[in-house]
Image (tube, rainbow, N blue to C red):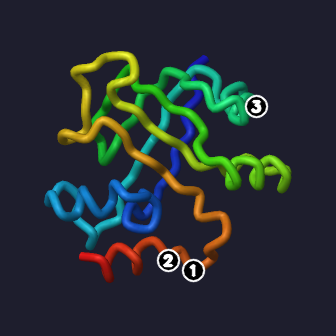
Amino acid sequence: MIRTLQKKFVITAMIAITALLLFLLGVIDTSAVHTIDIVMDDWDGFLDTCTNEEYTICTVVIDNESYKNVGIRAKGNTSLTQVASYGNDRYSFKIEFDHYDSTKSYYGLDKLSLNNIIQDNTYLKDYLSYCSSS
């Protein structure tokens, strides 16, 4: 059974360095809330093995645009071990569009980092740092 985990994120507060790049390239509209849906066969099994940092195949749907056969893994070092030590599953993720098919990208980007922002209750630190650097 295919399980779908739908998470809605404000991309400017979620995406690491790629948010700034997407903004500068004009791909992301920072005045809107965007959705990223991650679809895979066994989400719970994936979460159970996140500390291994191994890629798993999934489909990523960004604002209703579907990208199939994409690689996803938990990312981080300190943040990865922090999540595990907190006993929750709020991991940061690295999405690699070309992991299984070298011709795939998201508007020219081959990777996307989704930060869990576990230590920023305001959800503003990434956004403000991107704004001040542009």
Q: Of label 1 and label 3, which has the lower sequence position?
A: 3
Q: CA distance from mark 2 to mark 3?
A: 29 Å
For the residue pair 63 and 83, the one nearer the viewer reads as: 83
Label 3 packing within 10 angstroms: few (<14), some (14-19), many (20+): few
Between marks 2 and 3 in the image, the one whose residue lies nearer the viewer: 2
Provide the secondary structure element on which disc 1 rests.
Answer: loop
Marking on residue 42 = none
Find residue 109 and report its horizontal and vertical position in percent: 26, 41
The residue located at (44%, 67%) in the rendering is 13
Q: Which residue is mark 2?
A: 125
Provide the residue designation for mark 3: 48
SS of the residue at dot 2?
A: helix
Percent position of residue 88, x then y: 79, 50
Q: Earlier in the sequence, mark 2 or mark 3?
A: 3
In the depicted structure, whether residue 117 falls above or below residue 67: below
- Does the CB distance between marks 1 and 2 fall below 8 Å? yes
Q: Quadrant of the N terminus?
A: top right
Q: Where's residue 132, x and y in %?
A: 32, 82
Say above or below: 120 vs 35: below
Please name whichever residue, 109 or 57, is drawn nearer the observer in this view of the structure. 109
Quadrant placement of the C terminus: bottom left
Label at residue 122: 1
Amino acid type of the residue that numbered disc 3 sits on in the rendered structure: Asp
